[in-house]
């Protein structure tokens, strides 16, 4: 088991317009707070440390991105927050409750890398699935048809998933994740399999959907531009063992528009994330290749 | 059956080892169950011999059992090889055009699932009552499972592989040798593995009808003569034969796939 | 789509018709071997034997249906138990694949020793021939649930029953049907083959009798009836599958369809 009191992974301050975030010690009101989180896996005879002493804070209604090379444990981090993976050490608090409690209350929205739709259920039936499983007695604020309109799939209500394109399938998956008004929205490289153009469009839609409900959102991605464009705060991770190397606040206004991508603030933020990933001199010490992203 | 090998051994060796081990485990468990059943049900010897009695028959009439088992094994083996060769060639023809593929594939799938063994009487009519009748039944029964897999293998090829060969200006024979066959090999052998038990069964069932040699004949004959020790010994041997040929093909499959 | 299917059907019917016509022409020219009758002779035999055929068909069909139903019920029950006991499905699956490699039907003479040539033997052999494909298909199907779907149901805090009802059972259906199709045809074969060993009545017995008395058209007629029965049983399950499984199932759902 790794030492929970490992030296702070945060390196010394950096210059530039992009401000370092203040890591609040306490639980920010209703947001996500991760303290000293470590995860180790046993693979045959060796022990793999996927996450090592991770601290993370995200205020309620904030949108954060986690970025890092393959194998840095960013997916594992998301899975701990969703109570899919159990931590070996450390705590996670979502608005003051544990992930397990929040999951049992059915208030976690998770969007997987692949759409993960049930092939025998229509679009509407897939979106209704969480409602069919609703034991917590939540009264959903939106009907499946509201959600279908929200993600722009009118006319495809009765289509089966394999009749839809990849982008449309992922829209269904997003609508499904919102079905029970989740407290937190967890997105695991949701558009990683889509082409750049579709991806751009889906990102804009995701921001629109998010701005309508303002849920706390955590996005895992390996695209620097995507992380900066989407998030208020970017957590940069390094692999083996997975640590948070830097936390960067993005000083861009909302709503975000594609034209912002050419503004100096955006370019500066992208540069900041890039040098956090590769080091200031651009040496590939944390190359994006190699490793299984657990 | 795709999990990693045992320690440092290659995967196919692991498969082979586990095959042998599972055959031994099966034989021991079967003998224990058998003895238990004889005791528990108080089976009289004219209904069910004990494993020891059967073992006695296995030793005492070993020559007879061995000769008949080899006959059946030969029918199944030759039949499997012919069926595989036919399937590789005809499968290649059936995937030559998309239209041929669309026509042939559903029939191949349906006939794979239908027990072709049942046409053994016609084969007996046409081929006569010898070794080749058994082989023909095995070929007919084993052909379709292998064919289905062959056709899958030929079309499962990633398009990029063919386009790369085209860019390299490869001749059709080179495409076949370097790309199509290596991709199809795994499929052919997984078809062989499916067909192997069918082959043994087909050989034995055809011997019921053609009946003068083979394990199937021996089983039927000893049952008719109420030589139960011999009957049970022959049946156990037939089961081991089925497992043996199944694990042999599974091992070959593992070795040739170079997983 | 439909036009292509119709064209395929046309080619198939045309192909079979063509072969039959060719056989008929060869028969008319006297060019067929003694062991191959002209199709018309088989048809005439069918009309002549229709009463006897009905007499022999009844016990065979009954045995196939009873044996199949028993085998399906038992196999699904076993798969269900395997689902409840943690780790049991892997063991049961390997066991089923192994036993499936054993020519169990060849042990039918033992049953004749125990039960005589009555209906018990037929039913048991039909059940033996259909049991393992269903078991293998059912377990394969229950194991086929992929990781992300499991995680989805976990995140949604689904209960055990909901997971079974909404995820595992529907997901297993394509695999189960692959097993059901094979086993339906297998049950027919099992019943027929067990009658080769000895029976007082039955299609298999009629077939064996025709063979030993060298009644060539009758052998072919019995053959054609068995093939139609087996394909019909397969097609019946296929039709049911098409009604139940409306999504495109994953490729390679048949037992032995393990793609490399």
Image (spheres, coloured by chain):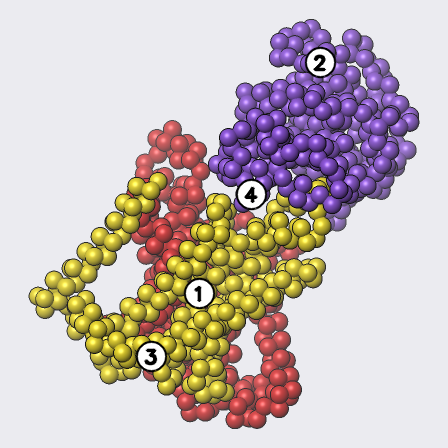
Chain colours: A purple, B red, C yellow
Residue A106 visible, this angle: yes
Q: Which mark is residue A121?
A: 4
Q: CA distance from mark 3 to mark 1?
A: 19 Å
Query: Gap between marks 2 and 3, in whole Å?
Result: 82 Å
Quarter-of-image position of residue A26: top right
What residue is disc 2 on? A254
Front residue of A35 and B258? A35
Could you give the CA–CA distance between mark 4 and mark 2, rounded to whole angstroms?
A: 36 Å
Identify residue for label 3.
C56
Q: Residues within 10 Å of mark 2 (few under 14, many from 20)?
A: few
Which of the two labelled residues, at mark 4 and mark 2, occupies the earlier sequence position? 4
> To which chain does the residue with label 3 belong?
C
- Of the residues tagged 3 and 1, which is closer to the observer? 3
* Tag 3 and tag 1, C-beta contact below 8 Å: no
Relative to C166, A237 lies left or right: right
Alpha carbon of mark 1 to alpha carbon of mark 2: how far?
63 Å
Q: Nearer the viewer, mark 4 or mark 1?
A: 4
Q: Which mark is residue C184?
A: 1
Q: Secondary structure at mark 1?
A: helix
User: Camera-side residue: A68 or B10?
Assistant: A68
Q: Residues within 10 Å of mark 3 (few under 14, many from 20)?
A: some
Determine whether B229 is above or below A283 in the image.
Answer: below
**Mark 1 closeness class: few <14, some 14–19, many ≥20 residues within 10 Å:** many
Q: CA distance from mark 4 to mark 1?
A: 28 Å
Q: Are marks 4 and 1 in contact (CB under 8 Å)?
A: no
Q: Position of residue C61 (x, y in %)?
A: 39, 73
Subunit under mark 4: A
């Amino acid at each position: 088991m790794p030492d929970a009191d490992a030296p702070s992974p945060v390196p010394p301050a950096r210059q530039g317009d992009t401000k370092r975030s203040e890591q609040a010690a306490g639980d920010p009101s209703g947001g996500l707070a991760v303290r000293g989180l470590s995860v180790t896996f046993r693979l045959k005879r060796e022990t793999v440390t996927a996450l090592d002493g991770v601290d993370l804070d995200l205020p309620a209604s904030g949108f954060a991105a986690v970025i890092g090379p393959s194998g840095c444990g960013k997916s594992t981090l998301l899975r701990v927050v969703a109570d899919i993976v159990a931590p070996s050490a450390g705590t996670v608090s979502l608005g003051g409750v544990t992930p397990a409690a929040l999951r049992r209350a059915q208030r976690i929205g998770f969007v997987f890398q692949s759409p993960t739709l049930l092939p025998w259920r229509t679009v509407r039936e897939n979106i209704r699935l969480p409602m069919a499983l609703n034991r917590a007695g939540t009264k959903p604020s939106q009907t499946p048809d509201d959600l279908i309109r929200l993600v722009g799939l009118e006319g495809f209500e009765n289509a089966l998933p394999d009749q839809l394109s990849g982008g449309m399938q992922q829209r269904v998956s997003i609508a499904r994740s919102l079905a029970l008004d989740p407290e937190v929205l967890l997105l695991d490289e949701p558009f990683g399999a889509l082409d750049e153009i579709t991806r751009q469009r889906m990102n804009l839609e995701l921001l629109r959907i998010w701005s309508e409900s303002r849920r706390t959102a955590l996005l895992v991605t390996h695209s620097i531009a995507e992380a900066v464009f989407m998030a208020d705060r970017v957590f940069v991770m390094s692999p083996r063992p997975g640590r948070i190397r830097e936390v960067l606040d993005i000083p861009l206004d909302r709503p975000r528009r594609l034209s912002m991508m050419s503004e100096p603030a955006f370019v500066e933020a992208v540069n900041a994330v890039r040098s956090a990933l590769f080091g200031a001199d651009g040496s590939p010490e944390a190359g994006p290749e190699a490793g299984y992203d657990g | 059956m795709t999990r990693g090998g045992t320690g440092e051994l290659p995967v196919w060796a692991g498969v082979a080892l586990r095959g042998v081990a599972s055959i031994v485990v099966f034989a021991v468990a079967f003998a224990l169950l058998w003895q238990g059943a004889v005791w528990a049900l108080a089976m009289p010897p004219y209904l069910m011999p004990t494993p020891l009695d059967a073992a006695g028959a296995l030793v005492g009439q070993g020559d007879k059992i061995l000769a008949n088992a080899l006959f059946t094994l030969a029918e199944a083996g030759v039949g499997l090889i012919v069926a595989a060769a036919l399937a590789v060639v005809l499968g290649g023809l059936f995937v030559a055009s998309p239209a041929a593929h669309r026509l042939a594939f559903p029939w191949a799938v349906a006939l794979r699932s239908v027990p072709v063994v049942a046409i053994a009487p016609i084969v007996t009519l046409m081929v006569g009552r010898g070794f080749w009748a058994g082989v023909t039944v095995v070929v007919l029964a084993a052909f379709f499972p292998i064919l289905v897999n062959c056709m899958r293998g030929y079309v499962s090829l990633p398009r990029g592989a063919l386009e790369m060969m085209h860019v390299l200006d490869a001749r059709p024979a080179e495409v076949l040798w370097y790309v199509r066959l290596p991709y199809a090999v795994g499929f052919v052998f997984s078809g062989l593995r499916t067909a192997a038990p069918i082959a043994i069964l087909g050989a034995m069932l055809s011997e019921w009808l053609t009946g003068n040699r083979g394990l199937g004949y021996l089983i039927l004959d000893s049952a008719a003569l109420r030589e139960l020790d011999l009957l049970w010994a022959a049946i156990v041997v037939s089961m081991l034969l089925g497992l043996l040929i199944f694990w042999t093909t599974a091992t070959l499959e593992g070795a040739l796939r170079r997983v | 789509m439909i036009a292509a299917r119709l064209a395929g059907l046309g080619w198939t019917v045309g192909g079979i018709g063509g072969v039959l016509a060719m056989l008929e022409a060869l028969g008319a020219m006297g060019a067929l071997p003694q062991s191959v009758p002209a199709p018309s002779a088989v048809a005439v035999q069918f009309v002549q034997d229709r009463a006897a055929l009905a007499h022999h068909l009844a016990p065979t069909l009954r045995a196939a249906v009873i044996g199949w139903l028993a085998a399906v019920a038992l196999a699904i029950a076993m798969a269900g138990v395997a689902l409840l006991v943690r780790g049991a499905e892997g063991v049961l699956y390997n066991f089923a694949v192994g036993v499936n490699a054993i020519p169990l039907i060849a042990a039918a003479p033992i049953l004749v020793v125990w039960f005589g040539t009555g209906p018990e033997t037929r039913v048991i052999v039909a059940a033996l021939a259909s049991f393992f494909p269903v078991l293998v298909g059912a377990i394969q199907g229950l194991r086929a649930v992929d990781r992300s779907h499991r995680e989805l149901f976990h995140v949604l805090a689904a209960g055990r029953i909901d997971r079974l009802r909404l995820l595992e059972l529907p997901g297993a259906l394509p695999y189960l049907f692959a097993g059901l199709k094979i086993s339906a045809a297998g049950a027919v074969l099992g019943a027929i083959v067990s009658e080769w060993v000895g029976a007082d009545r039955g299609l298999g017995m009629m077939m064996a009798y025709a063979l030993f008395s060298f009644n060539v058209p009758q052998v072919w007629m019995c053959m054609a009836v068995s093939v139609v029965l087996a394909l019909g049983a397969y097609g019946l399950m296929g039709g049911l599958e098409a009604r139940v499984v409306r999504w495109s199932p994953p490729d390679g759902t048949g037992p032995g369809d393990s793609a490399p």
